[in-house]
Amino acid sequence: MQAIEVENLTKQFNGVTAVDHISFTVKIGELFGLLGPNGAGKTTTIRMLTGILKSTVGSAHIGEYDIQKNPLEAKQMMGIVPEMANAYIDLSAIGNLLLIGELYGIQRKERVEKAENLLKLFGLYEKRHHKVRTFSKGMKQRIIVAMGLMNDPQLLFLDEPTSGLDVESVRLIRKLIREFNDKGTTIVLTTHNIEEANQLCDRVAIMNYGKIVAIDRPEKLKRAIQSTTSVEVAFVKRVMPGEFTFEGVSEVKKVGNKLRLYTEKPGEIIPMLVKYSQSSGNKIISLNTLEPNLEDVFLKLTRRGEK
């Protein structure tokens, strides 16, 4: 049995297709990422998987339960942190967690213990009696993620959990996501942050215009796009990308004080760069061959989907 099984899932709004016949599975214990630009269909997908929206076509199973036919049983397995979630700002930090625990029917002694443990994990125990309205955005987001964990979910949905947060909160939330996944919680994470997906996810589904354009482990996705191998070079004197129209180079980008030349044949480009350096008298400071990263894969696949 899979944690999630999605088949032909589709959602239309007034004739506009937001999610377009997608199919995928998530294994029990997996940290699965939905990666894509804003408007790709990630949040709509999560809303269908969590029973907030009904699909136009297709089905989604959470464990053994069809989310449309058995929503209560499916939702009892979940913790949900929506993108636009809010804590109750006139309640204290612990008050928010105790309220969620009560809604899940957790006995008072157990919910107090769980709430205190989560507040300690999220670095908010000292402020447990402070009203949430006094918290920074990062602290509020930590409370919201903690609320999603109050029922010890088998499956946790996180929709853009670190978007717009300070560096400290981002690091802490990512660290805790890893820890809960290591303890066996299946996690589905939506993000437009490529590095976040690369750091956290076992597998990534890249979405664009409502479709899944690729799905695999980050490392396999990188290896699949070998044409995005690049040579990165820095010279003593300033150079412009237009000076390097070498045969075999598909694109030249300026990256800080370096140039990145994309090519399928880095071994042929390096001698050309050395020859350029000698003929121009512009000494090479650094020269490296780079394998494709997840950003390269993402850009190539989403551009392909736009054509």
Image (cartoon, rainbow, N blue to C red):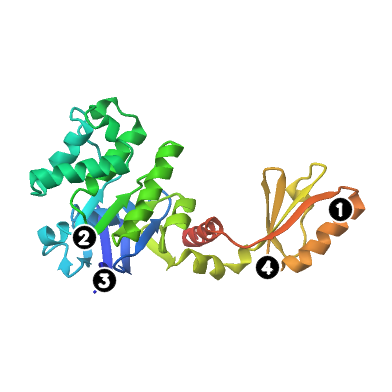
Would residue 30 appear left or right of 77 to someone viewing this image?
Answer: right
What type is the residue that disc 2 sits on? Ser
Q: Nearer the viewer, residue 230 or 213?
A: 230
Which marked residue is nearer to the observer: mark 4 or mark 3? 3
Q: Where residue 252 is drawn, which disc sits there? A: none
Q: Determine crowd level at label 4: few under 14, some 14-19, many 20+ residues with C-alpha closer than 10 A.
A: some
Q: Are marks 4 and 3 in contact (CB under 8 Å)?
A: no
Q: Where residue 277 is drawn, which disc sits there? A: 1
Residue 18 vs 5, above or below: the answer is above
Which marked residue is nearer to the observer: mark 2 or mark 4? 4
Hey, which quadrant is residue 197 in on the image? Answer: bottom left
Location of mark 4 (residue)? 264
What type is the residue that disc 3 sits on? Gln
Q: Earlier in the sequence, mark 4 or mark 3?
A: 3
Q: Where residue 2 is drawn, which disc sits there? A: 3
User: SS of the residue at dot 4?
Assistant: loop
Q: Nearer the viewer, residue 135 or 73?
A: 135
Q: Residue at x 36, y 47 (%)?
A: 160
Q: Earlier in the sequence, mark 1 or mark 3?
A: 3
What type is the residue that disc 4 sits on? Glu
Q: Position of residue 227 (x, y in %)?
A: 62, 66
